Image: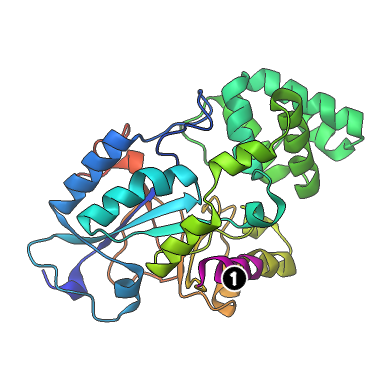
Amino acid sequence: MNAGEAELLVVTYHYLSAGTFPGKGVHAFGPERFREQVERLAGSSRFLSLEELEDNRRPPLGSARRYVLLTFDDGLAEQFEVAWPLLKVLGIPAVFFPCTSFLRQGNLLHVHRLHALRGAMADPDLTALFLELAENRGFEESARAIRSGECLAAPYPYDAPPGRALKSLFNYSLPLEEREALSALAFEKVFGEEAPWARRLYMTPSMLRELGRNGCIGTHTHAHRPLARLPVERIRQEILESLDILEETAGIRPLALSYPYGNALAVSPEVVEIAAECGLSWGFTTERKTNPPKADRLRLARLDAEDLPPGKRPIFSL
């Protein structure tokens, strides 16, 4: 097979150790399985860097059957601490997609508050806490939605119904400001101040600078919001603000975007168009499949690490 006929497999990772958020709310892939998966991929695939991906002439495959790009979402410090040293030793390129709000506000992302809270409480108890807080704060629209349980059917195939409903409500359906305020209030009630958690969870500026020097930085937007649920100017702001902050912090203005959540509820044709207008060349979704040679550069699919051996739910063999 020549380079022009080879598929591109993109693999995405999130938590690798879950040292900050132990418990059932986080499913860490783990350092051992990460190493094993990378070694298995190396036996059958040719790893690509962002720079090589940008080049119209991809390097020769040799004996490999496909190209592979490794990606890491959210900007978690454990990715730098667990994955980056191994990748450097093995000479394997990757792309890290941090969000940037923590660099300005020092706060946890809404999605990570939910992970921590679901690790500390049963989903029905957490839903009851959110309802109490919504009623106390006068968030009438959110309170009505929580009571009714009516929400968008978000794709969470591996969650039980209570968890699927909670995540659908709080990631997509409730008013943006209210859902983020409720997760902050709940986090404070259960754990206390969130800033120390954010300092442990996310990459430091020095980590981002090292990744920037090695050409390994993309963006995951500013605050990890489902872009297709936002007004047009808010979409543009989420992307451009992150690019500006990363250029200032890491010394490189990214050309690649990992869409938060990455599914059809979060990525629309309008979102893709705005990403291109913001100067981005590559966009990565969470559609679980490989990419043919002429796939849309701004709508590339990715498999989760758990979808490949030695993951928990392999749908693709190596």
Q: Provide the major secondary structure of the magenta segment.
A: helix
Q: Which residue is mark 1?
A: 248
Q: Residue furthest left?
A: 63
Callout 1 crowding tier (Cα within 10 Å): few <14, some 14–19, many ≥20: few
Protein image colouring? rainbow
Residue 141 versus residue 224 in the image, above or below: above
- Give amino acid for label 1: Glu
Place of residue 299 in the rendered image (x, y in percent of width and height, measured from the top left): 45, 65
Place of residue 133 in the rendered image (x, y in percent of width and height, measured from the top left): 83, 28
Residue 134 makes an appearance in the image: yes
Q: Bounds of the magenta span?
A: 240-251
Residue 49 versus residue 140 in the image, above or below: below
Place of residue 102 in the rendered image (x, y in percent of width and height, measured from the top left): 64, 51
* Image position of 257 (left or right of 265): left
The answer to whether residue 194 is magenta is: no
Which of 219 and 200 lies nearest the eye of the viewer?
200
* Image position of 42 (left or right of 299): left
Which of 79 and 159 lies nearest the eye of the viewer?
79
Residue displayed at 35% across by 51% down = 84
Q: Residue furthest front?
A: 206
Which of 166 and 211 lies nearest the eye of the viewer?
211
